[in-house]
Image (cartoon, rainbow, N blue to C red):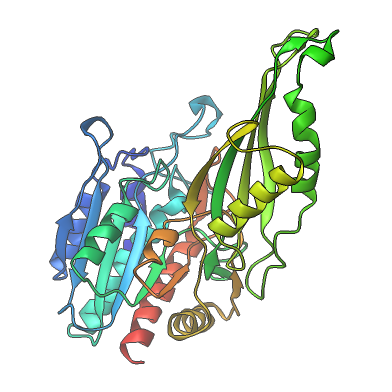
Amino acid sequence: MTDALQLTEQLIARPSVTPLDAGCLDLIAQRLGALGFRCERLDSGPADFRVANLWARRGTGQQPTLVWAGHTDVVPTGPLEQWDSDPFSPTHRDGRLYGRGASDMKASLAAMVVACEEFVRANPHPSIDIAFLLTSDEEGPAIDGTVKVCEALQARGERLDWCIVGEPTSVERTGDMIKNGRRGTMSGRLTVKGIQGHIAYPQLARNPIHMLAPVLAELAATVWDQGNDFFPPTSWQVSNIHGGTGASNVIPGTVVLDFNFRFCTESTPEGLQQRVSDILARHGLQAGTDYELAWTVGGLPFLTTPGTLVDAVRAAIRTETGLETELSTTGGTSDGRFIARICPQVIELGPPNATIHKVNEHVAVADIEPLKNIYRRVLEHLAHA
């Protein structure tokens, strides 16, 4: 059994359902400490929802720094009876390693650690610093994890030049796709206020659903931007509509619309918010009187164009697998959105993601060793660039 596979199994065996870490960071810190990393816990959050955070650095702090980033927490298992084996007992079947977190993202964490062990043994005094930024709050609210560590690092002027997040980005084979950016996410809750009344006397009421209807049609038809070479156009989607009392003879007093923007670098939160307000005004709805609108910005978009880090990752993948990796910005958000605020080059690279968050999550055993080797080759490339 390889070191990376063994460490993956040890991490899976720890039931670190968000925000629990279940000892994963202690295990990783022990191995990093043996390599000369200075390990620092930056835990955050209330006592009943304490988030475990680890910042570890090896080097002088004055050299270019590559940061490995990821999370030890996993999503809940779902119904245990639907699993073919205990989700926290790493199990092998048909060349696959099963367990919650196998793909998202304990195989990546193990590959990162072992890649650093191999690299440091061969290069005890490299020309780059190496760091780890790990949290147990990526699958949860994500308010006391990576974002808090990044704030602390920024406040004390820590140098971060490149970052690789171990999210499972591949499709068929490890290395066939990496994420060189992610879209931003912004949600809105629009409450349109009418006047409740008897449905037989509409002249005595004001139906907020009727008030919303033309607004909804225009919002759904609006082209927000054209996207660019790296991002698809910004998308606006309805997630929920709540209106009515449940009775068939009552005009409701309010209707609530929940919606979300997934936006690219061609749009800004402020610009999108203003355009929504303009559409509401165009249909005669006035803020405060006719509606209330609350916004939540979940994350800003980030983009790393081809350059030092992308080139190093592409070269490592090509050498190890023969693949020409595809750059992509599709999918949901990741903690890369926080790291990109303080680190100029951020990409995501991990194993295939077909089973993440599913019952019987697994990773192909044959994908783990190549992933570790790709990570090590990136270190070698950056250290000799």
Q: Quadrant of residue 326?
A: bottom right
Identity of the residue drawn at 50% across and 30% down? 78
Residue 216: x and y, percent? 76, 40
Q: Is residue 244 above or below residue 365?
A: above
Q: Quadrant of the C terminus?
A: bottom left
Identity of the residue drawn at 63% across and 72% down? 230
Identity of the residue drawn at 37% across and 71% down? 163
Q: Nearer the viewer, residue 92 or 128?
A: 128
Q: Nearer the viewer, residue 245 or 45?
A: 245
Q: Quadrant of the N terminus?
A: bottom left
Identity of the residue drawn at 63% across and 41% down? 259
Residue 103: x and y, percent? 48, 52
Residue 374: x and y, percent? 43, 75
Q: Report the residue that reaches farthest toward the bottom.
A: 385
Residue 1 appearing in the image: no
**Taking 280 as reference, is 204 left or right?**
right
Q: Quadrant of residue 51?
A: top left
Residue 277: x and y, percent? 64, 47
